[in-house]
Amino acid sequence: MADALLIIDMQNGLYDGPEKPFERERVLATLNHLIGRARAAGAPIFVARHTGPAGSPIEAGSPLWQLCPALQVDESRDHLFNKTRPSCFLGTELEQRLRAAQVKELVIAGMKTQFCIDTTCRVAVELGFSVVLPEDGHSCMDTPALKAKAIIEHHNATLAGAFVKLTSAVEIRF
């Protein structure tokens, strides 16, 4: 059973920007389902926002930086934090907060598969956390080289075993 949930970069500028993430409505519904189950079990929920420098489209406080309004985050009880790199750990207090909450196993979900999801999964394992990755709980956009579906499938296959326990979101328990 997982001890905590980490949702990464579900922000207006990524979710609702000019390039739409693969199966975005389904992924959002999956994340909200995970949030509901974590909350019902009393598991802490951590929510990362990627923050750009002043003047960038995703600078702190800007409309594109805001969390997607349909994401069922409760700012009064969930742990929101800002990051500036693909790793949710670099330059943040996430590791300390997870350790203070005695988290050993962490569910990681959100966006973007090939950047922040991949990096955060690998770093979490290096820091000694067990990671559960819902194969259907992360997304990204098409790139010139690969379609989003192929990127997601590739990262699920690459991360499984060596870095994460790969499973479907409906099988995750808190």
Image (cartoon, grey):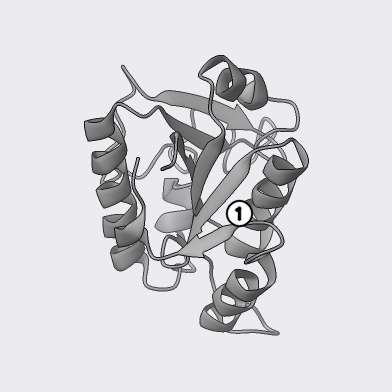
Residue at image position (44%, 23%) is 79
The picture places residue 84, in percent across and down from the top left corner, at: 69, 36
Quadrant of the image for the N terminus? top left
Q: Going by the image, does 92 lie left or right of 33?
A: right
At label 1, counting other C-alpha atoms closer than 10 Å, the crowd grade (few under 14, some 14-19, many 20 or more) is many
**Whether residue 66 is situated above or below residue 169 in the rendered picture:** above
Quadrant of the image for the C terminus? top left
Say what secondary structure mark 1 lies in. helix
**Whether residue 159 is situated above or below residue 142 in the rendered picture:** above
The picture places residue 23, in percent across and down from the top left corner, at: 37, 72
Residue at image position (58%, 48%) is 131
Q: Going by the image, does 29 lie left or right of 57?
A: left
**Whether residue 12 is situated above or below residue 73 in the rendered picture:** below
Between residues 42 and 139, which one lies in front from this camera angle?
42
Residue at image position (43%, 37%) is 66
Considering every residue shown, the one lying at the far front of the view is 1
Residue at image position (37%, 24%) is 78
Between residues 20 and 100, which one lies in front from this camera angle?
100
The picture places residue 103, in percent across and down from the top left corner, at: 53, 28
Query: Is residue 67 in sight in this rendering?
Result: yes
Instruction: Report the number of discs.
Output: 1
Between residues 62 and 25, which one lies in front from this camera angle?
25
Query: Is residue 86 in sight in this rendering?
Result: no
Q: Going by the image, does 142 lie left or right of 88?
A: left
Give amino acid for label 1.
Ile
Residue under label 1:
117
